[in-house]
Image (cartoon, rainbow, N blue to C red):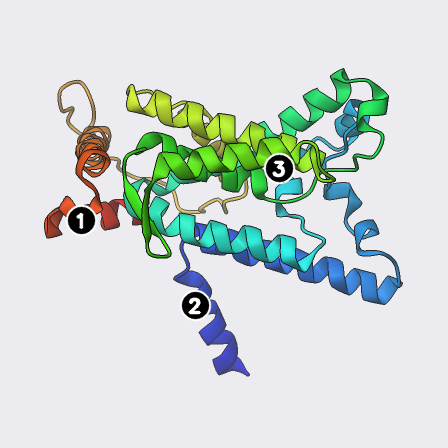
Amino acid sequence: MSSLTYDIKDKLKHLNVFEKIIAVNIAVFVVGWLIKVFLKTEIENTLTWFELPKDIFDFMVQPWSIITYGFLHYRPFHLLFNMIVLYFISKTMVNLFPRKQSLNIYFLGIIAGGLAYLAVYNIMPESFSAKVGSLVGASAGVNALLIFLCAYMPNRETKFFSVRIKLWHIGLAIVVIDFIGLFGINQGGKVAHFGGSILGYFYATQLLKGTDIGKGFGQFMDKIADLFKPKSSLKTVHKSKKKPFAGHNKESFNEFNNQKKIDLILDKISKSGYESLTKEEKTFLFKSGKD
């Protein structure tokens, strides 16, 4: 049993950040299902405090739901579809972009989807949202990543079965499908999809101009994470000063230099495709995605 536990811990340790998010989504689904079985209730009644309610006043009582709703799925197919798409997108994201930047896009997409949902159903007449329930699912974050890739490198080609199509074609198809879905039964979900898609598109277009709109959000999340890190009891006796490089310390200079290399490689991919990269460039991108 201890060997099995060790194997599981070892495998979890080597998952990339999105694979860990997928694992959390699956774990939350299992918890909801277990609560349903033990309490003999509907699964929709198990984790309601983590759903995003459509009423703005209900949301004010549970503000954390702007993030937590993205980890809730009540239907196996809903979970399966979102996690499969997220898995395949994450393979591209972690190889081409820094881990923190990819996470910023994903979580900002979830937030943008939630805000779009809240805005629409608190502005439109009540009759418009009478049949709309609380929001759950990771689709807004998944859409943000998808549309980001489609907007950042629109002319990169990928295979769809035996047909080669450009990424911007996929992005356009996603937007059209979501627009049609606004007139279907999952209206609230499609509104959130649009929120995530808009965030992904805006993030990509600004990044192409040299502006990372998620940088502030990433720094804020780092500060939140620091609150939960254990404090070291060891006192620092001596701290060496790092000499500046062109007005920056060595760490920030290297980060800036690496980002420039990544931008040049991504520009090459956008124009000529991933296959045009040299072995060294592919290795560099892979290592950068793990940072």
Label 2 to label 3, Cα distance in Å?
26 Å
Residue 76: x and y in percent read 66, 59
Who's the residue at 50% across and 37% down the image?
A: 174
Q: Quadrant of residue 148?
A: top left
Q: Position of residue 62 (x, y in %)?
A: 75, 33
Judge from the rendering whether residue 80 lies leftward or rightward of residue 159; answer left or right.
Answer: right
- Position of the N terminus by quadrant: bottom right
The residue located at (25%, 50%) in the rendering is: 286
* Amino acid type of the residue that numbered disc 2 sits on in the rendered structure: Lys
Please name the residue that numbered disc 3 is placed on: 67
Q: Amino acid at mark 1?
A: Glu
Q: CA distance from mark 2 to mark 1?
A: 30 Å
Q: Which residue is mark 2?
A: 11
Residue pointed to by mark 1: 275
Q: Quadrant of residue 119?
A: top right
Q: Residues within 10 Å of mark 3 (few under 14, many from 20)?
A: some
> Which secondary structure, mark 3?
helix
Going by the numbered disc 3, the residue's amino acid type is Ile
Looking at the picture, does residue 114 appear above or below residue 43? above
Q: In front: 69, or 10?
A: 69
